[in-house]
Amino acid sequence: MKGIRELCKVIEPVKLNKLHRFNKSKSWEQGYNKEHDFIVVGKSGQIGEVLEIQGLRIALPLAPKTIHCNSKVQLKQKWEKFEDNPYFSKIKTVFDWQTHPADFKERHYSYIDEEFKRRDEGFWFTNKGVKTWITGSYYMYLQWSKIDVGAPDFREANRLFFIFWEACKVDKRCYGMCYLKNRRSGFSFMSSAETVNLATLAGDSRFGILSKTGNDAKKMFTDKVVPISLNYPFFFKPIQDGMDRPKSELAYRVPAKKFTRRKMREKEELDDVEGLDTTIDWKNTGDNSYDGEKLALLVHDESGKWEKPDNIRNNWRVTKTCLRLGSRIIGKCMMGSTSNSLAKGGQNFKDLYYDSDVTKRNRNGQTKSGLYSLFIPMEWNYEGFIDEYGHPVFHSSEETVLDPHGSEIEDGVVDYWENEVHGLKDDQDTLNEFYRQFPRTEDHAFRDETKNSLFNLTKIYEQIDYNEGQRNTAVLTTGNFQWENGVKDTRVIFTPDPKGRFKISWVPNAPAQNNVITKNGVKFPGNEHMGAFGCDSYDISGTVDGRGSKGALHGLTKFSMEDAPANTFFLEYVARPPTAEMFFEDVLMALVFYGMPILAENNKPRLLYYIRRRGYRGFSMNRPDKIWNKLSVTEKEVGGMPNSSEDIKQAHAAAIEMYINDHVGQTEEGFGTMYFNETLNDWAKFDINKRTKFDAAISSGLAIMACNRQLYRPNPETKKEPVNLMISKYNNSGASSRIIKQ
């Protein structure tokens, strides 16, 4: 659907003949399957659909031939909570159960067994004609958890959340999840329900809760965890020590066994059963909370709102060790939150979230944080806009759409959201807070307060929002440059490629492409009057951690009479190819194709030497703030501009500020034509005192300086000579005046 981000997609990583063969022999083992790079979440040895959720490939169980269906009419097929067994209303403990006659218990064994099976294996039901599987954890949440509004509603977004969580649990490489959410998405209740679900099954284990403050953690414990535990039926609930509604610790004594006919015999002596010895508690917020303890599950609620001196990243470094013994992961973490502004804890959570990207792993197969990141846009899980089948209502419809309670949903969630945004467009900080609370993109979730930016954040975010609205139009093309026929130093062509390193919004017409002028064996740019490039390079191919800064290249047009957009960034490159030489060649090909010069920092000079060695010294601009005879030997040799001087740093930042004020966001001519959101976001968080982190900002600022180098041209020094006005001076003492000789 236009403008709507998909939560998942069905993939087919296994050939059908192998799929059928392994299903027949029930050979699919639960956990990570290295051969096919997916995680099997079922226990049956058979798999069905394979979903990809935010880069994580998850194999679901194979659907059985017979599944639950509450109606023969397709439109009436949906999730419905099963009615509680009325015979169990007064049975609070297994001891109460033992007081009932044998024939009573005999009638209910199958019901209890079935509930344990659903808890263990998950549950299949028909949802508007579609066979739908939910995990055992989600079944326990829907069927047996009591929340503030009563029983939870089924939501497709939450179904995928629990599937993702199940994959985190069974993947031995994973420490848990880092969930970026919108308000009222249900995370606090879902994580509380999972805490109770796992704690009532585990022996000799500890479960912990942290939040943005100790009071918040305590409230989650007393208002969510404890009531959910109390609502469990007797056959799921161990005997609890202490008060019914404890304030600090929930302790289970008698283990929750699968009450089969053998284990629920009338004469079984339950008093002699060994205790479960499992607890759930909460801690005050701090970097060292739960330090040195062993945890089966750690719930991190509101982790994007930890304010100084508390730091969620520091705490995670500590608590991560509570979930492992040596290299073996023995516990998991459920972390979820909206984000505060970056200065109020949001930056730490943002860093942790992006360190949890499942597509970026170390040699041990783990993300940098050990967690797996998940983002569900607000339109998928916004209360009041979920239909009776659990699916979001994106746009207003002429057809009648009902919510799970039978009320009509008149508007679509996207329409509602856009109306809210429109009403806040003149109050940028309030708008940014709305974005953080109800994000449709990750960029929305991490919007910052305008007062925290060096530049005009209002205009930057105006442009980002405008670009988001244009994302489905053909404004940008992704691709790569290459030498024609693979022959270097000939013609360069651009080839579209969705996985390419370049993003471009404009190319010169055919006669202006590859406009290179050769003088005395040195090549010069033929389109210098049209624009220029800026570049933030790197010298070393590999780094210790395999990450390192990225190389950045930006192209910007000048105001000219040529057939080109004026004062427009037309190219963005922010990447780190396997070798530095590949980056250098990428840069060189872009210069040749556009026929424009480059201004690069010369503190990392390998790129400039590479350009000179290939015969393109004429493309490398000299620093604009000095005349030729004031340049150093190296500067004369390869060109470029240093970044060490405070004057240069200030001039660079001023160049970006000037461009933003004149050409970004709402202008007199409409909206600016700066379409590169990665660069805009780099400008938004730019810190002049920590410039090395902002590759795109450095590169784009140099491009602006290159196109406006006349502003930085030094005034020629003039030698001031004393002027002889030839005015005579007189000695007027005595009777007559006498000329004083000079």
Image (cartoon, rainbow, N blue to C red):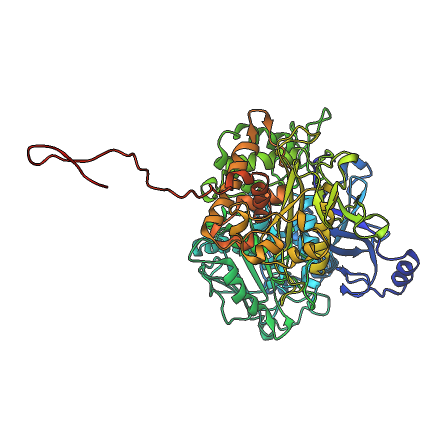
Residue 692 locus on image (x, y percent) = 54, 55
Q: Is 434 rendered above or below residue 197?
A: above
Residue 455 locus on image (x, y percent) = 49, 41
Q: Residue furthest right?
A: 17
Q: Is residue 729 left or right of residue 442?
A: left
The residue shown at (61%, 68%) is 255
Residue 302 in view of the camera:
no
Q: Is residue 289 left or right of residue 231?
A: left
Residue 214 locus on image (x, y percent) = 44, 57
Which sits in the foreground, 528 or 662?
528
The quarter of the displayed image where residue 738 is located: top left
The quarter of the displayed image where residue 496 is located: top right
Quadrant containing the N terminus in the rendered view: top right
Quadrant containing the C terminus in the rendered view: top left
Which sits in the foreground, 442 or 10?
442
Q: Is 172 rendered above or below residue 360?
A: below
The residue shown at (71%, 29%) is 563
Residue 461 in view of the camera:
yes
Residue 422 locus on image (x, y percent) = 56, 28
